[in-house]
Image: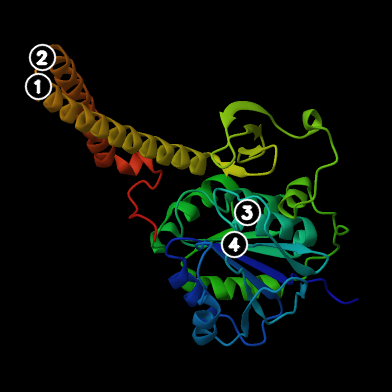
Amino acid sequence: MTPTRRDLVVVGASAGGVEALRALVAGLPADLSAAVVVVLHIPASGPSVLPSILQRAGNLPVKHVADRDVLTSGNVYVAPPDRHVVVVDGALALSKGPRENGHRPAVDVLFRSAAWSHGPRAIGVVLSGGLDDGTSGLAAIQRLGGVGLVQDPSDALHPGMPRSAIDGATPRFVAPVAELPKLIESLLNEDIGDLTPSLEPDWETQMSLLRDDPRPLDQRPGVSSGISCPDCHGVLFQIDDEPPRFRCRVGHAWSIESLVAEEALAVDQALWTALRSLEEQATIAAREAERASEAGRAEAAERYDRKHSESHAAGAVIRQLLADISSGSEIMDGTESAPPAT
């Protein structure tokens, strides 16, 4: 009887991920008995040169994912900008579905679809990055029989993603990135025995593919959180899996740390907008006070002077608040002591 082995490795990374991905790919053998699919969080605009970087780093052929690419062992597939990569029926689909944690491509979309399509045959790898992207997807891989590997946070340029994956997904292995290729090889050589049948894509993967969930909204998983989606401002529904996460009616998804960080950005933007409005208000009032004084309208000049002083004082309060937030930015943006992502 032919042994059943793992045949899919999905890898997620964000800030600091290029260096980690180069080290990982450099250690994989040319005869690797699995397909490797990579999501690196990148800007939606502009070209991605990651395939050429990884091609030079290792011995495996590397390319951007094309829609309906059939998964082939010994190949590395890289998510292109502004498209989710979804594993469906042994192939890769590209989708412009709703963002997850503000990202497209998103690590969790790839991981979740790999969990449901490959079950025990999937290996998930979380590398350097900020916040908690990848934790939910890695937990799904392990929940459905796959194996989770995480870069040791002390080895990562940005330890947030590895640290979150360790806390929230209980991976089987945690190791420096230089040791991960050997671990992957050993896992690919294991006979994993009987497999559960392939599963249909779960409802979250269906949403990532822009397929409508046929169930009425009140029958979908989650309860109304009373919190608005930062992307579309609709209501977020809290899904109490481990780890818990949020998803809105149209499918935008947020993990807890990413939602807190996004709300902090919204507060920052609102404060700067308020400061700009107050300074413009003060400028207008000062000009009108001068005009009124020149025209001999003492009462109007006094009123505008008072408005100028009030606006200027309120602006000073917001400036101080912005300074206080800046001094505590590691708390506001969720990055702890890590440097800002690039």
Front residue of 50 and 57: 50
Element type where label 2 sits in the image: helix
- Find disc 1 in the rendering and name its residue: 293
Mark 2 vs 1, N-terminal side: 1
**Image marks 2 and 1: residues in contact by CB distance under 8 Å:** yes
Label of residue 108 in the image:
3
x, y percent for residue 219: 81, 30
Residue lying furthest top: 299
CA gap between label 3 and label 4 equals: 15 Å
| Residue 261 left/right relative to 271 | right
User: Which circle, 1 or 4, is nearer the viewer?
Assistant: 1
Of 167 and 72, the residue lying toward us = 72
Q: Secondary structure at mark 3?
A: helix
Disc number lying in front (3 or 1): 1
Q: Residue at 59% of width from left, 57% of height from top?
A: 104
Tell me the number on the disc at residue 11: none
Q: CA distance from mark 2 to mark 3?
A: 65 Å
Q: Nearer the viewer, mark 2 or mark 3?
A: 2
Q: Which residue is mark 2?
A: 298
Say what secondary structure mark 4 lies in. Answer: loop
| Coordinates of residue 74 in the picture (x, y in percent) | 68, 82
| Residue wearing tag 4 | 82
> Percent position (x, y) of residue 179?
50, 72
